[in-house]
Image (cartoon, rainbow, N blue to C red):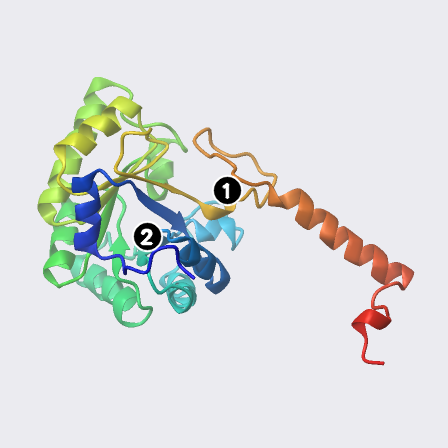
Amino acid sequence: MSLSQDKVTIPGLRGMKQKGRKITMLTAYDYPTAMLLDAVGIDILLVGDSLGMVVLGYENTLPVTMEEMLHHTRAVKRGCKRGLIVGDMPFLSFNVKSELAIENAGRFIKQAGAEGVKLEGASESIVMIIRNIVQAGISVMGHIGLTPQMIHQMGGFKIQGKDPESAKVIFESAQRLQDAGIFALVLEGMPNDLAKKVTEQLSIPTIGIGAGPHCDGQVLVTHDLLGFSESAKPKFVKEYASLYPGMFEAVKSFKQEVLEGSFPSDEYSYC
């Protein structure tokens, strides 16, 4: 049972910011994870295109397709009752033309049950596309700073806004996105003071990931938080559990018992 039974809404998120109540957001890619996060009372479940790297084994997020995103969003929807479900729009599903962007954003809502979509970037063309999606009646979350869909342009996963010029670009981008109608903004991979400045200037909530403690909320990849693998993790990731060693030993024990013939014993057999 959820720790809080009140359904999370977009106006409710703005109210959280106004009251100084921190917002929690985690990634979910499947039904059991969605059930777990919803039972705890996580506010926003992000079906991130990070699923390409985390569960599909891609090198980065760029190969992820709309069909893959819709498939995983539907699974999350079946496991979530309270949290707000946001679907990540994958690379080239929105940044080509507005008509395609509106159609794909609409598929997240109509076909997969999401309540909003997230778009990366803040170029003039993307701001215009976001404005058109919002005008079509679809709620949009923005994402600036380190934007994984643009890693080739950025030269890899690098902290953004470290110099005054690039910090000014991020600051101004945040305001343009708010003016375009987004309901929240992810700030990724930027100095704490810049994220604080952006958060203070906006009336919408900011959600930080590698952006320090001053954002209105925080997000992590759930698999990172749980220590689901032994791969290297960014500095901003805190492992609240280390599940990989336990899972490894459990599978190892199963293998050994099958090989030696001790599983299944009478206890696990229909005698």
| Residue underneath mark 1 | 224
Q: Amino acid at mark 1?
A: Asp
Q: Is residue 9 above or below residue 79?
A: above
Report the residue at 34% width, 45% height from top. 24
Q: Residue furthest bottom?
A: 271
Residue 29: image x %, image y %?
45, 58
Query: In the picture provided, is 241 more to the left or to the right than 13?
Result: right
Q: Quadrant of the C terminus?
A: bottom right
Question: Mark 2 — residue?
Answer: 44
Residue drawn where x is 48% and y is 34% of the image: 238
Look at the picture and state if 102 lies above or below 174.
below
What SS does tag 1 mark?
helix
Residue pictured at 27% horizontal, 34% vertical: 215
Which of labels 1 and 2 is toward the front? 2
Write down the quadrant of residue 236 in the picture. Answer: top left
Identity of the amino acid at label 2?
Ile
Q: Position of residue 229 (x, y in %)?
A: 59, 43
Residue count near mark 2 (Cα–Cα under 10 Å), binned few <14, some 14–19, many ≥20 = many
Q: Position of residue 128 (x, y in %)?
A: 12, 49
From the viewer's perspective, is residue 174 above or below residue 252? above
Judge left or right: residue 81 versus residue 171.
right
Q: Is residue 59 visible?
A: yes
Secondary element under disc 2, as helix, strand or loop, is: strand
Q: Earlier in the sequence, mark 1 or mark 2?
A: 2
Q: Quadrant of residue 6?
A: bottom left
Picture coordinates of residue 116, whole percent (x, y): 25, 58
Q: Quadrant of the N terminus?
A: bottom left
**Label 1, label 2: how many angstroms apart (C-alpha)?**
17 Å
Q: Does residue 64 appear in this view?
A: no
